[in-house]
Image: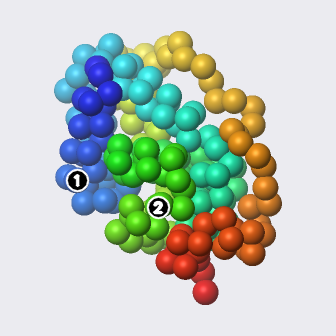
Amino acid sequence: MDETEFWEIIDNTREAAEGDPEDHADLLVERLLLLDPDSVLDFARHFETRYNRAYRWELWGAAAVLLGGASDESFDYFRCWLIGQGREVFEGALYDPDSLAELLDDFDDTVDGDGEELGYAADEAYEQLTGVVAPALGISSQPAEPEGAAFDLEDDKLLAARYPQLWERFAEA
C-alpha cells in the first residue's frame, strides 16, 4: 500500500461517516476488512508513522487551544483524529499548527478531536481477518519527548500569542 492509497482510504471512510469520529472508525475497520492482512499491516505502518510525526510540542499547543486543554492521553487521541481529517489538514497542521483555524470548517470539542478508535482500526481489522493480534510493525516507536521546545500548555496568554488564529476562532470565551 502506498501513501496515496492510505489517504484515499482515510478520506473515503471519513466522508462516508460525515465527519463523525466513531462512525469513521467503524467504516475504516469495514474497509480494511476488504484487504489482505499484509495490506492492513501496511495501512497500520502508514498510520503509526504519521502518528509519531505528529508528536510535536507546537501541535500539542494547537490541540490545547482546540480542546480547552490537552492531557497526554487527549493529545494521543487528537493525533489520531488529525490523521483522520486527511492529508491536507494533517500536513498543513504539521507545517503550521495555527493554520488549523483555516483548514477546519468547524470544531466541536464534544465530538471532534478524539480519534481514539481510529488508532485501533487496523489492529481490529487484522485480528478479525487472522484471529491473532497484529505483530510488531517494525517501525520506530514514538520518541520519549515531543519534537521541538517544550512550553507551558496551560498558559492562556502564551497560547493566544502562539496561535492567534486558532485562539480567536476556537478558544473558550
Q: Residue at x 23, y 22 (%)?
A: 35
| Residue situated in front as seen by the camera: 16 or 87 | 87
Vertical order, 26 against 22 (above or below): above
The image quadrant that residue 148 belongs to is top right
Q: Report the label total.
A: 2
| Front-most of residues 22 and 13 | 13
Q: Quadrant of the N terminus?
A: top left
- Percent coordinates x, y for residue 108 in the rendering: 45, 71
* Residue kind at label 1, given as amino acid type: Glu
Residue tagged 1: 15
Q: CA distance from mark 2 to mark 1?
A: 19 Å
Is 106 in front, or is 41? 106
Quadrant in which the C terminus is drawn: bottom right
Residue in the image at 75% along x and 32% along y = 144
Tell me which numbered mark, 2 or 1, is placed earlier along the sequence.
1
Query: Considering the numbered disc 2 on the image, is that residue within a helix, a strand or a loop?
Result: helix
Asked if residue 70 can be seen in this view, the reply is: yes
Compared across the picture, whether 172 is left or right of 158 comes to left
Question: What number is the disc on residue 100?
Answer: 2
